[in-house]
Image: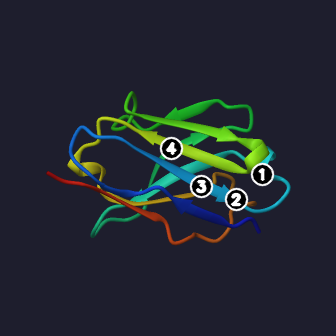
Amino acid sequence: QVQFVESGGGLVQPGGSLRLSCAASGSAFSDYEMGWYRQAPGKQREFVGRISSSGFTFYIASVKGRFTISRDNAKNTVYLQMNNLKPEDTAVYYCNTVDFQTRGSWGQGTQVTVSS
């Protein structure tokens, strides 16, 4: 299975920005549709958005227009650019494949805290 390492989280004020990175192992990364997920305190992990192998993206309504997913297949890396962050975006952010057949183990995630 592919494995992932998330990074780039931190503490930011409302309205601020962060860029998260997801580094993947394996040689088949370019074939995978990749997703970003997050888990807020006391809540279940939720899907945030995804990017196809060809670069097509989809986002949940609450982040549309604020978050942008991109990928660099040469680096086996997916990015999540987060702008105009809100306190409700506070969560641990994870990446993984969208396809359950290729999904790897969940990593440690990276903490994003939006607070004034």
Task: Determine the CA span between mark 2 and mark 3.
Answer: 6 Å
Q: Mark 2 packing: few (<14 Cα in 10 Å), some, or many (20+)?
A: many
The quarter of the picture where residue 27 lies is bottom right
Give x and y (percent) for residue 36: 52, 50
Dot 1 corresponds to which residue? 29
Say above or below: 55 vs 100: above
Inspect the image, locate mark 1, and give the three-letter code of the amino acid beneath it: Phe
- Quarter of the N terminus within the rendering: bottom right
Inspect the image, locate mark 2, and give the three-letter code of the amino acid beneath it: Ala
Report the residue at 54% width, 61% height from top: 6
Residue furthest to the left in view is 116
Inspect the image, locate mark 3, and give the three-letter code of the amino acid beneath it: Cys
Mark 1 vs 4, N-terminal side:
1
User: Secondary structure under badge 4?
Assistant: strand
Dot 3 corresponds to which residue? 22
Q: Are marks 2 and 3 in contact (CB under 8 Å)?
A: yes
Q: Are marks 4 and 2 in contact (CB under 8 Å)?
A: no
Say above or below: 72 vs 36: above
Q: Can you tell which mark lies on residue 80?
A: 4
Report the residue at 78% width, 51% height from top: 29
Task: Determine the CA span between mark 3 and mark 1.
Answer: 12 Å
Give x and y (percent) for residue 62: 33, 38
Q: Are marks 1 and 2 in contact (CB under 8 Å)?
A: yes
Q: Can you tell which mark lies on residue 98?
A: none
Mark 3 vs 1, N-terminal side:
3
Mark 1 vs 2, N-terminal side:
2
Inspect the image, locate mark 4, and give the three-letter code of the amino acid beneath it: Leu
Dot 2 corresponds to which residue? 24
Between 100 and 34, which is closer to the camera in this rendering?
34
Mark 4 vs 2, N-terminal side:
2
Task: Determine the CA span between mark 4 and mark 2.
Answer: 14 Å
Mark 3 vs 4, N-terminal side:
3
